[in-house]
Image (spheres, coloured by chain):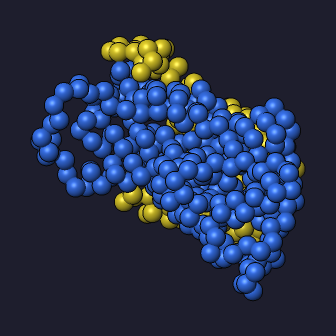
């Protein structure tokens, strides 16, 4: 076996990183780990978001608590940013490589078993990226879609908080924003219906016993996530929450 | 000519050599017996081409009994044709009907360049094997049978992976032209045996490095390879190889 490929004993951290970042499996592992981290965030985000059903006090307190985290908030934000960037850059690098690996397309090609979610990873991922940017500009930076947002703080027990509850109500009473949101979240579900199981397979965490189970669990978890996210805007549009 | 003979229309990839541009060419195949194998059908077409003084269609074949891994062909968009777990040589013309149009293309991958017509160079697989697809053993007297105990479960896992005939259908079926199922099978067949342990980390690192060097794509876990594999190699070998590769990489192991 070639000496330039394998070295004995202490390879050194740079050697380890080189092996990971310069191999297809290593880049896939980066995508899998960052993807799973983002799935974890999505579930926490969805759970927090469901507090809209508990009224303005509960929701604004939750948002205020997150904003008061200070350094921890920024650590989480930077971590999520890093995960998104690594995930997207690795996907881009691998996609370029994959396109080069099949320069001449088949005149005829049949899909045998690949699911819709698996075949739509690239377009769904790209649209989700744009959605995340819009979503941040909308609710975090307050730069777009802010028509009707009131600047009056929500006050309780002498604490003044940003009235995020009101922002949500106003935004999702707009059917255009609600539909755009629902479509984007549905695409996230499509992406994760393959992504969850694919991540675990890439990390070598699946065997013949668990693969069939996880193949059903992935789409189920994705469905739950979509349902949780879409429930709030739909409730607002239907004036269940107001 | 008996009445059950079929008249078929073929759309076949013809290419003079590795550098020449190729294209699909329409060729009529009349009077094909349903008892012929797919390759015998092509033999018949070739005989007629030669009678007319034309160049026969080049395609790979050897044992014609489904075990050598030489035959290839993407038939109507599927490697080895429409029958599950069957190589092209074992596909029979009774699976087709009179008047059918059949599209026949070579494996498509930059790592498998087309040499002529339907023949591709699968030397990339040989170089991957040479990089680590073996166990280094001392020569000498043959060891006693059963001297090294191994469980039935492990032996089966190794033998299932070792069924791979290296035909390249996995690469042909993959939308990324990835060779992960092939390399996974070759890593897994040793990883389940005691003899494979001393070089286990080295093997995974070396074979994956060679696979990447050959220009195969990355795995996106669509599992088309498993469905197209004439030997039914499971994608579990990919998970096993990933585990071995990542462990060896992270531990900085030899």
Q: Position of residue B215 (x, y in %)?
A: 64, 31
Question: Along the horizontal axis of the image, is B146 left or right of A83?
Answer: left
Q: Return the residue nearer the eye: B207 or B25.
A: B25
Q: Residue at x 55, y 32 (%)?
A: B211
Q: Is any atom of residue A98 visible in this view?
A: no
In the image, residue A227 above or below residue A94 = below
Q: Position of residue A230 (x, y in %)?
A: 68, 63
Q: Return the residue nearer the eye: A96 or A2.
A: A2
Q: Position of residue A61 (x, y in %)?
A: 58, 48
* Chain identifier, blue in the render: B
Q: Residue at x 35, y 21 (%)?
A: B254
Rendered-image quadrant of the C terminus of chain A = bottom right
Question: Along the horizontal axis of the image, is B27 left or right of A96?
Answer: right
* Chain identifier, yellow in the render: A
Q: Residue at x 76, y 57 (%)?
A: B46
In the image, residue A18 above or below residue A117 = above
Rendered-image quadrant of the N terminus of chain A = top left
């Amino acid at each position: 076996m070639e000496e330039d490929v394998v070295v004995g004993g202490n390879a050194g951290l740079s050697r380890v990183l080189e092996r990971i970042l310069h191999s297809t499996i290593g880049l896939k592992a980066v995508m899998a780990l960052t993807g799973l981290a983002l799935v974890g965030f999505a579930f926490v985000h969805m759970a927090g978001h469901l507090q809209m059903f508990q009224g303005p006090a509960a929701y604004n307190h939750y948002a205020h608590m997150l904003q008061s985290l200070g350094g921890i908030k920024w650590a989480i934000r930077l971590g999520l940013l890093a995960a998104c960037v690594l995930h997207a850059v690795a996907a881009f690098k691998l996609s370029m490589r994959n396109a080069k690996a099949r320069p001449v397309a088949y005149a005829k090609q049949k899909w045998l078993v690949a699911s819709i979610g698996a075949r739509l990873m690239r377009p769904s991922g790209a649209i989700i990226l744009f959605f995340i940017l819009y979503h941040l500009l909308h609710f975090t930076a307050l730069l777009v879609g802010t028509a009707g947002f009131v600047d009056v703080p929500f006050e309780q027990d002498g604490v003044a908080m940003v009235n995020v509850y009101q922002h949500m109500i106003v935004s999702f009473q707009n059917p255009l924003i609600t539909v755009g949101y629902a479509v984007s979240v549905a695409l996230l579900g499509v992406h994760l219906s393959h992504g969850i199981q694919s991540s675990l397979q890439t990390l070598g965490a699946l065997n013949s016993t668990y693969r069939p189970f996880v193949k059903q669990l992935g789409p189920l978890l994705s469905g739950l996530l979509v349902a949780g996210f879409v429930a709030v805007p739909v409730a607002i549009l239907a004036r269940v929450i107001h | 000519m008996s009445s059950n003979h079929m008249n078929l229309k073929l759309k076949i990839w013809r290419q003079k050599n590795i550098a020449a541009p190729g294209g699909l060419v329409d060729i009529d195949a009349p009077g094909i017996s349903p008892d012929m194998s797919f390759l015998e059908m092509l033999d018949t077409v070739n005989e007629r081409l030669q009678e007319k003084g034309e160049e026969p269609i080049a395609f790979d074949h050897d044992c014609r009994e489904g075990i050598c891994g030489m035959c290839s062909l993407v038939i109507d968009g599927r490697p080895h044709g429409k029958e599950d777990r069957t190589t092209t040589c074992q596909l029979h013309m009774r699976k087709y009907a009179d008047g059918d149009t059949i599209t026949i293309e070579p494996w498509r991958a930059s790592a498998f360049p087309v040499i002529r017509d339907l023949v591709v160079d699968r030397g990339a697989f040989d170089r991957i094997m040479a990089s680590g697809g073996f166990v280094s053993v001392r020569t000498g007297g043959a060891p006693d049978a059963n001297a090294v105990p191994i469980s039935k479960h492990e032996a089966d896992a190794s033998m299932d992976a070792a069924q791979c005939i290296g035909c390249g259908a996995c690469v042909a079926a993959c939308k990324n032209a990835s060779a992960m199922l092939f390399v996974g099978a070759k890593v897994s067949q040793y990883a389940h045996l005691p003899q494979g342990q001393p070089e286990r980390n080295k093997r995974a690192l070396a074979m994956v490095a060679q696979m990447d060097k050959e220009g195969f794509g990355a795995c996106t876990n669509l599992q088309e390879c498993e469905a197209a594999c004439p030997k039914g190699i499971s994608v579990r070998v990919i998970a096993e190889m990933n585990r071995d590769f990542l462990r060896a990489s992270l531990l900085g192991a030899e």
